[in-house]
Image (cartoon, coloured by chain):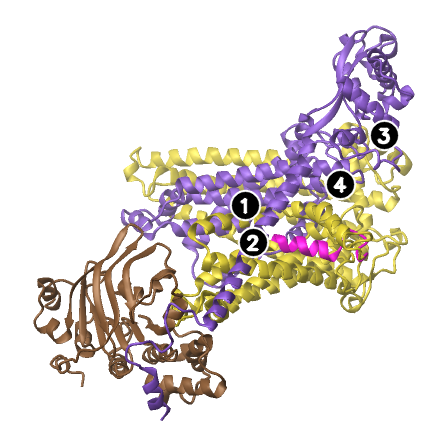
Amino acid sequence: MTDISQNSGAAPAAKPKGGSLFEKDARTKRRNAAEGRFKLYGIAAIGIGLLMLVVLVTNIVTAGTGAFQQSFLELNVELKEDKLDKKGNRNIEDIKKVSTFGYAPLIASALEAEVAKLGIQTDLSPKDMGKILSKAAQAELRNYVISNPDEIGKTVSFRFLVNSRVDGYMKGRVTRESIANDKSISVEQLDFVDQLRDAGILYKAFNPDFIFGSDASDQRPEAAGIGVSMLGSLFMMFVVLALALPIGVAASIYLEEFAPQNRLTDIIEVNISNLAAVPSIVFGILGLAVFINYMHLPTSAPLVGGLVLTLMTLPTIIISTRASLKAVPPSIRDAALGVGASKMQAVFHHVLPLAAPGILTGTIIGLAQALGETAPLLLIGMVGFIASNPPDGIVAGFLSPNSAMPAQIYEWSKRADPAFYERAWGGIIILLIFLVTMNTIAVILRRRFERRW
Amino acid sequence: MALSWLLLILLALAVIGYFTGRSRALASAGGDTRELHSLPSYYGYNVALSALVPALGVLIVWLLVQPMIVNSTVSGLIPDTAIPEGSDRGLIMSEVRRVANGLNGAVATGALTEAQAQDANADIDALTSALKDAGQVLTQDVTQPILVAAQKYRSMTGTGSVAMQVIVLALALIGAAFAYVRTHKEFRARNVVEQGVLALLLLAASIAILTTVGIVLSMLFETMNFFQLHSWKDFFFGSTWAPNFRGGSELSILPLLWGTLYISLIALLVAVPIGLFAAIYLSEYASGATRAIAKPLLEILAGIPTIVYGLFALLTVGPALVSLFGDGGALGLGWMSSSNAVLTAGLVMGIMLIPFVSSLSDDIINAVPQSMRDGSLGLGATKSETVRQVILPAALPGIVGAILLAASRAIGETMIVVMAAGAIAKFSGNPFEAMTTITTRIVSQLTGDTDFASPETLVAFALGLTLFIITLGLNIFALYIVRKYREQYE
Amino acid sequence: MMNDMTRVERTVDSKDIKIAANKVQVYYGDTHAIKDVDVQIEDKTVTAFIGPSGCGKSTFLRCLNRMNDTIDICRVEGDILLDGEDIYDKRVDPVQLRAKVGMVFQKPNPFPKSIYDNVAYGPRIHGLAKNKAELDEIVEKSLRRGAIWDEVKDRLDAPGTGLSGGQQQRLCIARAVATEPEVLLMDEPCSALDPIATAQVEELIDELRSRYSVVIVTHSMQQAARVSQKTAFFHLGNLVEFGETGQIFTNPEDPRTESYITGRIG
């Protein structure tokens, strides 16, 4: 019954029952408003994500660029013979007997002379004046004298690091207000710094030692550099590359080309996909228990770090390698088998070379992931170790204790002096430059060699 | 003879084997390669692999097993009376190893003669001072039982490594000789080599299993040790986390688990709506150009190392939150006293997870067939109605799987919480307070001076095992759901 | 009943023009997919679009309710008037248009919801029912019109995806009918169905003619002859011939139509 009554009303001759299409009814307006809101949520979500990226990158750049600059004080130091080489015979052993402490007066008097020459008026004692310099200055002077004993007796021009408070003042991090409770620097010293800066002998300059130098103790943030831990990371990456690439490729070839459909294969496959999602800290525990406690490999060694990162990276490499093997069409294998090649020959002679660009891309991405990983390194002692000297030689590079870039950054972030934070951000810039470079190479490789079958 | 030398000799043997095998095959065919069953190089590979593979296999197994045997034998030598109060066998054993290494070092530098080093009745004081003079590190005073054990340890290790070298080299030679003798033009070298290579490939694939077994075993043993020293009831059902290195610790996982879950929850509250809406916009609304730009940019967030997020939380987000919610902050609320807080860690972890959620959801939304969208749009539904009423319900299982994977990520995340969550274990619902997590405690219990005989250190392994089981369970469950979901539309 | 020639012989009264297309051009990126198509679709008539694969018949069909809007690279020129109103006018909301011009697709695409919810979907989003009782009534009426009521009335809560192919397609037709459209577009509705299900759907189409203007795309000439009163033959994006079904099949004017009907091109 309803059918019929509905029918007469539902099918009018010419004019549409719902009114003109050109007029939106109230409900459609409401629905379109809801549509607009929904779309807006989506845009907002993307906006928030991108905003976070911008905030993060801006934050890294603004906070980190300072680390690449350092404040230096230029001084002409007279290397007095009566202080450095009393016997006057330039015997290197005798010169070495003068401790770092013994060089302090030389610097102090050089600064005093400079101040007098420039006509700077200050109430500071020479000792307090000297305190604006880094504690590393004396060691720097001593190293110079030991490697150039012939310069003793002459006056040499040096560029000394100033201490982190003065450096912070030059960069605007430290102000007269912020040092109210700071015992290591006074307002008078800052006035003195202003005078030296106006005189042009205290200035900011690019500091290559941050990139290439070694870490310094927590008293001397101005002298700390990331170079040695960069070497540590480099040696770890060698280990990862040397182990993860061949093992990963071999495992992928087996699983993709040869594995029979059986329980073992299933177990391996499930294992790999789950290992890819195991928290990295668990790999650290594994490394600690197996490589250090059981096998007694040296703590903090890049070799151990590399082994742990290898196990962590393997699933990533296997998954991407399998994808690129799968992308090689079966016709290639059939062609090789058709001319009488064995399956092994078909794989190694034809499939593997065709899949190589994809494998390489996956490996680079896996390496980049390993390079930025920190958590497992905490457990095998690569944090807390002060990487103050570069390793001597290749074997030592693998076996002697070292830090790694992300571990070094973490180490700096834990130290008390805020001057280290700047270095942590600076370290992040360097780490990210490496990662961006690696990922760019991977993208270029993929674009350049990607083949559509 | 160092291990590297042994490896070099093995490699040299393999290279020699390759050339002799190859030339013998050629000789047997009278120099005519067509007479051979396989290509000449396969005969060479056969000899080389026969020399290398068994020898290396034995070498690796030996290196793994020998320390176990030596340790158990030597630790049996130490009488219970030699173990001082408050110490245990494990500690004494590490001292024994240190003395043994010291003796080795001293003999190598010539500070001691071999005979002196082996003299069981040597004067302990003289020996100690000789070791110290030779620059060897000793943490404790050497006692008679330790010295005896150390000497036993030295001699067993020494004999073991000599035996290992002899056996490994002999195996390499026998393998090479066996393969060499079999080399003949009729010999199916390619088949044999390919079998060998296949076995190696299988071995490589099994490393995944070995890793899992390694993870489980390494944590399981130490966890069992932990439960011998500490009540499992307290670990699982206690309410307090208060490690005390003088004993009497309360080590319950529950407060840590609460902190972990709370921070993960906040992270998901940030990441899931943003990631999901971003995925919906990218897959349903965005033009090709927008998608091509926005998607990779968002994914950059996923490629940033966690240490960067940690630093961001510690130095930027934390202080910013304090300046908003803290004492004298912009909002004048005084809710937050330190930049280390659940909220800090949760927010930053949420940012990190946005691309993770969005790219997984994007894949899953794209797997919903276009015909569903057509059907809904063809009925006059708007896009948002289509998304909310057709696509999301259809994609729900997959999205739940994606969220579970993200949750597993959040639970296992370490650096952000280590740097920004704080170290206080407690049950609290206040997101402005500092709290601690399972991963944070693993790091703090296992770094610095650790004593692998104390429950305070061993608890880290129990925590690690629990973490592993939780994340593994979540992953398996999530992958199962996602796979079921995909099968539905295939 | 399904005898090919019965319907061909019948004379067709002239009816109101429901849709009038004028010089319609469709571009996919640089490809010119539809060229200069003029066609007038009458009310209460089944109009069939036939032609070889890729001739543009489905593309043209999707222009009639602006489903092509969902494809970024697709561009439509010319006028398509529904009851005298240009559906590509800026003031027209495609959502409102699609409520009037329903569509049934090639592959049955029930939503992963219950049978009831599938049918109630359209009425719900368009707000056609004031309360649950009215909605129940609409669902029942639509399922009856979809000729599937008797088969599903006892399991309205069962998922729509659990039905057989033919049932799914009739469910989709019921779903389209539920929004009270004026025109029903069908894009090869039987191509995924077996012969028995096809017969059922064809019978249904004939019944639907009493209420709606039906446009059906089909690759089967027999089907076009069986169900339609008007037939349009498309070839390479051109509308080659349009007229009474009987005339097209028995006495085509264009040699291309004849070649197609006799099986020489296809």
Which residue is outermost to the bottom?
A: A1
Estimate how packed mark 2 is, as few (under 14), some (14 to 19) or many (20 or more) residues with alpha carbons within 10 Å: many
Estimate how packed mark 3 is, as few (under 14), some (14 to 19) or many (20 or more) residues with alpha carbons within 10 Å: few
Relative height, residue A368 to residue A222 (above, below): below
Q: Is residue A255 left or right of residue A423?
A: left
Query: CA separation, marks 4 and 2?
Result: 32 Å
The amino acid at mark 2 is Pro
Chain letter belonging to callout 1: A
Q: Are marks 1 and 2 in contact (CB under 8 Å)?
A: no
Query: CA separation, marks 4 and 1?
Result: 26 Å
* Residue A225, position as x, y percentages in the image: 70, 31
Query: CA separation, marks 3 and 1?
Result: 47 Å
Which residue is found at the position 11% from the left and 81% from the top? C9
Does B340 lie within the magenta span?
yes
Query: CA separation, marks 2 and 3?
Result: 59 Å
Q: Which mark is residue A366?
A: 1
Can you tell which quarter of the image residue C128 is in?
bottom left
Q: Are marks 4 and 1 in contact (CB under 8 Å)?
A: no
The amino acid at mark 4 is Gly
Q: Are marks 3 and 4 in contact (CB under 8 Å)?
A: no
Q: Which residue is mark 3?
A: B133
| Residue C102 visible (yes or no) | yes
Drawn colour of chain B? yellow
Which chain's colour is brown?
A: C
